[in-house]
Image (cartoon, rainbow, N blue to C red):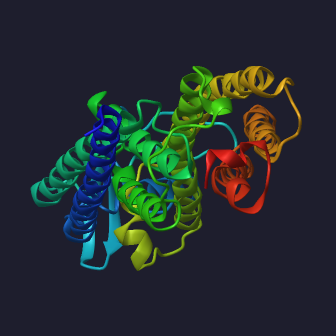
Amino acid sequence: MNPVDIAVAANESLAEFSNLLIKSAMAVYALAFVAHIVEWVFGSRSKVARTAAALTAQGAGRSGDARTAAAGKGADKVSVTVRTSGGTEVLERPRVVTRSAPGRRAGVPDGPGAAGGDERGDLYGRIAVSLTVLAFLLHFAAVLTRALSVQRAPWGNMYEFSTAFSMVVVGAYLAFLVAKKDIRWIGLPLVTTVLLDLGLAIVVFYTESDQLVPALDSYWMWIHVSLAIVCGALFYLGAVSTLLYLFRDRHEAKLEAGGRPGAFATSVLERLPSSASLDGFAYRINAAVFPFWTFTIIAGAIWAENAWGRYWGWDPKETWSFITWVGYAAYLHARATAGWKGRKAAYLALIAFLCFLFNYYGVNIFFEGLHSYGGV
């Protein structure tokens, strides 16, 4: 057999093995999804009313409501009576002595998380994270073997970009957990969207393992595209936090106005961090990633000059990358502008991420441009 034929056969074998690993990772992600569902459904609800307690106490403090009983001056606990579906419960919370800007809620505690604060729920949560780690290792191996099968960066077409993107999303999430950042509340939406992304990659975007066209065969592919993937993965975490912030903020406003939470709010929203925590997490991520997204666009322009002889030509991919940049710049500016903080700024962040998604999916599907030869 010709040595070249042997090499090609070995590459094809690696590509097939990569496909098998992707499907195996999807199976484990599905198990993690089930474990997260069980965590949220069967976790104890005994501590779910903490937000209602805090907001009820704040409202009572303003209106002289007799249901809030404080010990004397200098006491460090406040007892609050809360009516729940299981009857009447007396909760204690630390006295909060904070000063907040007008319109900001002070002293609203984070929810107990998906586990509800009990051992049973926490067990399911740890199982879900463990399965996510195993799925990530299989996912990483799949991307690596895909790269080895063609001896290049494993993001030369939409299939490869999708598999690499979702791998980095999971890696970023696990890195936050390793750094002792309690963001397990992202776990359920994360594994759900990763499964959808990998499903689309296999069913819609699958492309046979092959070499790159000459214009893409450049070291700038390692710099420009890898940065785009990392930035997009972190923007995704920020977008999930922003979306949950909008739900949680509306829930807190309803409680503060004396409304009664529904079943969805009791089961899900009360377990999340407070709206202020969610908003702060999203802002810190978006603000930190924005300079790298700026450099991603600059790196793309430099690569374009090397490949096509011009830095910028308003190609659809270039245009929507710039629109995404404008969206996040508007969000960051809104955060510093009076009257645009909170929900208005959050809407801008979600619009900016939708622009990123359209650049990720829509441009390759609906437009023809110089980036089209990268493959759908």
- Residue 296 in which image quadrant: top right
In depth, the one of 303 and 332 nearer the eye is 303
| Position in image of residue 101 (x %, y %) | 67, 37
Q: Judge from the rendering whether residue 272 lies leftward or rightward of residue 19; answer left or right.
A: right
In depth, the one of 70 and 97 nearer the eye is 97
| Position in image of residue 320 (x %, y %) | 78, 45
Q: Judge from the rendering whether residue 316 lies leftward or rightward of residue 76; answer left or right.
A: right
Q: In this picture, is 196 found above or below 7?
A: below
In depth, the one of 69 and 83 nearer the eye is 83
Quadrant in which the C terminus is drawn: bottom right
Q: Residue at x 60, y 23 (%)?
A: 218
In depth, the one of 79 and 278 nearer the eye is 278
Q: Residue at x 17, y 47 (%)?
A: 130
Q: In this picture, is 88 found above or below 363?
A: below
Is residue 78 in view from this perspective?
no
Q: Judge from the rendering whether residue 235 lies leftward or rightward of residue 92; answer left or right.
A: right
Quadrant in which the N terminus is drawn: top left
